[in-house]
Structure formats: C-alpha cells, structure tokens
Amino acid sequence: MKAVIPAAGIGERLRPLTLTRPKVLLPVAGKPILGHILDRIVESGIKDVTIVVGYMGNQVIKYVRNHYNLNFDFVEQKKRRGLGHAVLQGLDSSDEPVLILLGDTILDLNFYKFAQSRYNVIGVMTVEDPRRFGIVEVKDEWVTKLVEKPENPISKLAIAGVYLLQSQKRLKKAIEYIIENDITTKGEYQLTDALQVMLSWNERMKIEKVKACCDCGTRKTLFETNRYLLEKINYETRKYPNSVIIPPVYIHPKADIRKSVIGPYVSIGDGVTICDSVIEDSIINDGANLKNVCLKNSLLGFKSTIKGKYHIVDVRDNYARNL
C-alpha cells in the first residue's frame, strides 16, 4: 500500500501568505499543514508516499525530505484540472491499495485502523451546507451514490478528504474514464465523479465517520484549525520575563517573548520576537518581530515586522477620544 497526497494547489484564498510559499507549508499549531498530514501517514504505518506537487513544488520537496524518513516519490501536476486529475498523477497500474489524503485537510481519525480495512472506504462527516462538498448517500454504511457539490442535496454526509481504495488500477481506470468522456463538475475532473463511475462498475464502498475534519483552505478555516489543534495537543509552555501566557498556545523554544500577554489560541514560530504586546487568536510565523502592538485574529508572514507606538496622554474629566 502507498499513500497519495495532492499538494499542488496555489492557495489563492490565503494570499498574501501564499505569494511566497505553497499553502501546504503554512504553519498551523506549530507545524506546517503538510507536516500534520504526514504525521498521520506515519501513524498509519504506510512507508511509501507519493506527493503531487505543483505551485512552488521545490519548497514542498525540500521540507518533506528534511523532516520525514519515508519512501517519497514526487510527481508534478503541470495544469490544475481538479482533484481527480491530481490524484491520477500519483497512481500506478498495480492492484495495490492506495490511501488518499488531501494536502490541505487535517483529520481526527484512527489512521492505522482506517488503512487496515479490506474494503474501499470513504471518510465522511455531517455538514450543515452540503452544497459545498462531495456528498455521499448511504444505506447500512454502504455507499449508494456520490455527487460533487449538488445543488439539491438529499444527504448531509460530506466526503471528509480521506479515501482508501483497494486497487490503484481500478481507480486509475475510473479517472481516465471521466477524462476521456469529459465528465466534469464546474469545469474540473473530480475524484467524486470517478468514484461514482466505480460504483456504476459494481465496486462496493463503505463509509467511516471522522471525529473532526479541519480544512485549511481559507483564512477562517485556518484559524479554526489552529484553535482545534491547540486544544487537542495542549502544548506545554515555559515562563517568559514579565509576561502572561494564556493557554492553549504553541510557542517555539527559540521564540523571545518579553513584557507581553500571549493567548489564548496563539501559535508562535521559530525566532519570533515579541515585546510589550498583547496577542490573541493569531498565527505568528518564523522570524516575525512585534513590538508595542495589540493583535487579534491576525496572520503574520515569515520575517515580517509590526511595530506600534506608545501614547502619552493627559485627559480631562468627561472627555473621550479614539487613539
């Protein structure tokens, strides 16, 4: 068995941070998104991993090789033509199983158990607005129908970004079928449509509910993921000079914090310096420098600098002014 991780996306909704690095390398809760996903691969026991790269792929390759001791293969998706097309780049023609994990989605799931199944399995979750997802219709835990982003969904079970298929060869054939017959959803070749083709070929698929599905594709969901992981991991922190730390937070051991209030829900990277500041619910990336600022719901890029100023005021009674 091998794992395939599509990681070629540009991440336009996370600009300006993705102007200088790929989305999958943006840190969340103390580690790049892709790092959290590879940790799940290690947990599953799988040793062979194919990563589909594209936008700034060299950065992805460098990070992976420097931090993980698995058997990696890297393939390029030269044109972004949908998830099905991306997955196709990472498949071979063997009858070996494949575990597919999306490069921007962190899941709370027993991956070892999931990967041991003898069936085709799709991870699912219940959502309020199914129109944004690939939707699964089931009967007795067996999939009866799959639809990508339906206008009128009859199910609230959404695909959660993890798939186990027992034959790469059959999955590859199904994706090639939708490409040859130009079966698209909103102009893209979707994995959901290929899986529906497999159902029509009498393949059987089960579902497995995930405990949590943390999407990192937008600014809003990146913060939600940061909060969830910080609560779940519960990092220990040390004391800092004249500072107050309000957990849960992640603070890199080489960060320098003085006379500041940090937390809750703050991730601080390597080499960050913070002085005379109040930071809440924010992600501060490596090398950033903050002084005299009060920040909330903020994303600071690598080696960025934000400096405020003190105000000295004498105010008479019953006077109000915004500074």
Image (tube, rainbow, N blue to C red):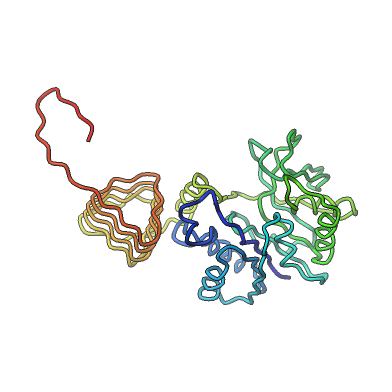
Residue reaching furthest to the top: 318
The quarter of the displayed image where residue 238 is located: bottom left
Residue 210 rendering spot, x and y as whole percentages? 64, 50
Given residues 141 and 35, the one toward you in this image is 35
Q: In this figure, what is the number of numbered marks?
A: 0
**Residue at horizontal 49%, vertical 57%?**
19
**The furthest residue to the right:** 201
As drawn, the residue found furthest toward the front would be 79
Quadrant in which residue 100 is drawn: bottom right
Quadrant where the N terminus sits is bottom right
* Quarter of the rendering occupied by the C terminus: top left
| Residue 87 spot, x, y in % from top left | 72, 61
Out of 33 and 311, give the one closest to the viewer.
Answer: 311
* 185 w.r.t. 285: above or below: above
Q: Residue at 51% x, 73% y: name it.
A: 67
Does residue 39 appear to the left or right of 256 in the view shown? right
User: Could you say where residue 305 lies in the image, as x and y percent from the top left?
Assistant: 31, 57
Residue occupying the point 46% across, 55% down: 17
Q: Position of residue 241 (x, y in %)?
A: 21, 59
Residue 135 left/right relative to 16: right
Q: Is residue 176 above or below residue 134?
A: below
